[in-house]
Structures are given as C-alpha cells and as structure tokens.
Image: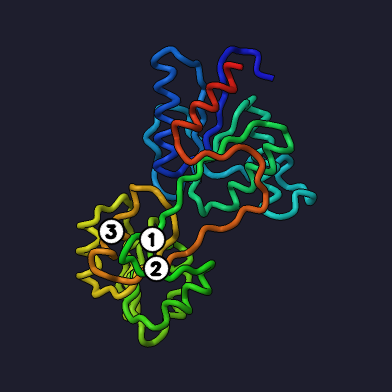
C-alpha cells in the first residue's frame, strides 16, 4: 500500500498517444493540480521516449520471480508474473495502457494482471480509420489474407513491420516489395527494398516514396490517428488501392476504454480525487 500522497501510475507506452498522455500528466504536476509519480514503460526496440519521468525498458519477463522456476511456463506467463511483481514492488495504483492498437500481447497481459490485483486499468484506444469517398480499401483480418490480396499486384508498399520482413524469402516471382520497418537496416535486394525509418510521415513524403518506387498497392494496419495517416492520404491522391489489416480482437477486456486522451486523463484524476 502506498502511504504517501503521491499517485503512482504506470503508463504502458511506445506511441505518440502515450507521449501526449505522459506530458499531460506531468504538466499537472507542474501546475500543482496533482502529485503524480509516473513510470513510462516501453519495449525499447524503437527509440527513447522524450518524457521527463522514470523510464522502464525491456518488458516485464525480467521481473518474474523466481526467474528459473519451472512453473512459470510460457513467455506470456513470465510476462504476467513479472508485471505483477513490478506493480506490487513499485506500489502502482493505476495502470494506463496506451500501447499500439496491435500490441495484443502487452494489452492482454496488462488486463489479466490488473484484474488479478483489482488494480484500475485505463486503456486508450484511438479511433480506427474509416474509408473516405473514392478510397479503395481491401480489408483483411491477418497477414495470410493480406498476402492473398496482394497477389494481383506487382509493387506493394508494405508498412506492417517485422511480419513482412520475415517473409521476404517467399515473395512471389512477379512481385517486388518495398518494406518499411523501424528496426531493420536499409537494404536493397533483387526482390525487395527494405527502408528503416520512423514516422510520422507527411503526405508529400509518402507520395514521393510511392511514385519513386512505382507502388501499385499499399499494405498497412488500421492504426488510426492523424500522425501516421500520410500514406492513406497519398494513396488517395494517387488513386492506389489499400490492403487494410483489421485490428485484432481482444479476448480479455478488463478495465475502462477511452478514445480521447483528455477523457482518459479526466477519468484518472476524478477517480483519484474521489
């Protein structure tokens, strides 16, 4: 039990939304409205978050106790046990999940662990993109369906990260992929071009990339948000089809869900004040 007057919050981040939420909470400290001790957690595979608080990197499996016990079982179980130990060790009172909409494993872990501890969990889920007039979307549920949908095309621009990178050895003979990933090195081979880059990307940047690489279809996740929709605007301007991967469905839905950052922050403060 936390015996101080500080509100101890763990923020699961790695997104622009999480940075915005973190900075808004820290601004409440500066104004004197709240006294929040914030821990910002990030997987650590992309870049260091620019937030003025304690940063936790590298996941939670490292906190599973004991580390070599057979009963811990799978990596998911280790992550759950590690997160539970971390929350208890740091006297966390609230958990905010502002991870990527496709970070199913981390969100599920947070939901299971917080429910087991009856710890409040506030999840930010940015609204999904919706097709606009003249958009040509081909919606699919997973990567396997995406590959089938890609088959009629010859120059796909694939922006779904590591999954595509792991599939380069099975690129069909009639295709050349342009793949963008945040964690791989730049590379150009006979069957694909790998671009290491981190957004956000403006519409003009995306349009030039698509024209330069003779792209005939865009493959992406329905991430939502305005900071990463440049590729959709560019595809619309160039009248290119978009293969859109639907968001995964969560099977464990403990906690409260918010579509706007300000609503989540208000809910946190209201709960704490009452």
The quarter holding residue 132 reads bottom left
Q: Name the secondary structure under disc 3.
A: helix
Sequence-wise, which precedes: disc 3 or disc 1?
A: 1
Q: Name the secondary structure under disc 2.
A: strand
Residue behind mark 2 = 137
Q: Quadrant of the N terminus?
A: top right
Q: Please say if the residues under marks 3 and 2 sit with CB atoms less than 8 Å apart.
A: no
Tell me where residue 141 appears, x and y as whole percent: 53, 67
Cα–Cα gap, marks 3 and 1:
11 Å
Tell me where residue 221 appears, x and y as whole percent: 44, 60
Q: Would residue 125 appear left or right of 156 to someone viewing this image?
A: right
Q: Would residue 263 appear left or right of 154 to someone viewing this image?
A: right
Residue displayed at 53% across by 68% down: 142
Residue displayed at 38% across by 60% down: 131
The quarter holding residue 233 reads bottom left
Sequence-wise, which precedes: disc 3 or disc 2?
A: 2
Q: Residues within 10 Å of mark 3 (few under 14, many from 20)?
A: some
Q: Residues within 10 Å of mark 1 (few under 14, many from 20)?
A: few
Residue behind mark 3 = 233
Residue behind mark 1 = 131
């Amino acid at each position: 039990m936390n015996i101080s007057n500080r509100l101890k919050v763990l923020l699961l981040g790695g997104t622009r939304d999480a940075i915005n939420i973190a900075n808004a909470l820290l601004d409440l400290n500066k104004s004197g409205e709240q006294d929040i001790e914030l821990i910002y957690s990030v997987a650590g595979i992309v870049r260091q978050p620019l937030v003025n608080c304690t940063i936790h990197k590298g996941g939670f499996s490292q906190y599973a106790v004991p580390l070599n016990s057979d009963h811990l079982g799978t990596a998911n179980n280790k992550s759950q046990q590690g997160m539970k130990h971390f929350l208890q060790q740091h006297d966390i009172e609230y958990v905010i999940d502002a991870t990527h909409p496709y970070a199913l494993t981390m969100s599920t872990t947070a939901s299971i662990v917080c429910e087991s501890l009856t710890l409040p969990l506030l999840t930010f889920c940015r609204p999904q993109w919706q097709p606009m007039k003249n958009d040509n979307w081909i919606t699919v549920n997973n990567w396997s369906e995406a590959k089938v949908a890609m088959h009629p095309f010859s120059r796909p621009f694939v922006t779904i990260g590591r999954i595509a990178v792991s599939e380069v050895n099975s690129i069909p003979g009639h295709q050349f992929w342009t793949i963008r990933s945040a964690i791989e090195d730049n590379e150009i081979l006979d069957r694909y071009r790998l671009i290491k880059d981190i957004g956000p990307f403006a519409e003009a940047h995306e349009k030039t990339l698509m024209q330069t690489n003779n792209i005939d279809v865009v493959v992406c996740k329905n991430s939502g948000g305005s900071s990463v929709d440049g590729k959709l605007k560019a595809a619309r301007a160039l009248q290119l089809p978009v293969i859109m991967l639907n968001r995964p469905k969560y099977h464990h839905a403990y906690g409260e869900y918010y579509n706007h950052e300000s609503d989540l922050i208000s809910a946190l403060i209201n709960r704490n004040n009452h």
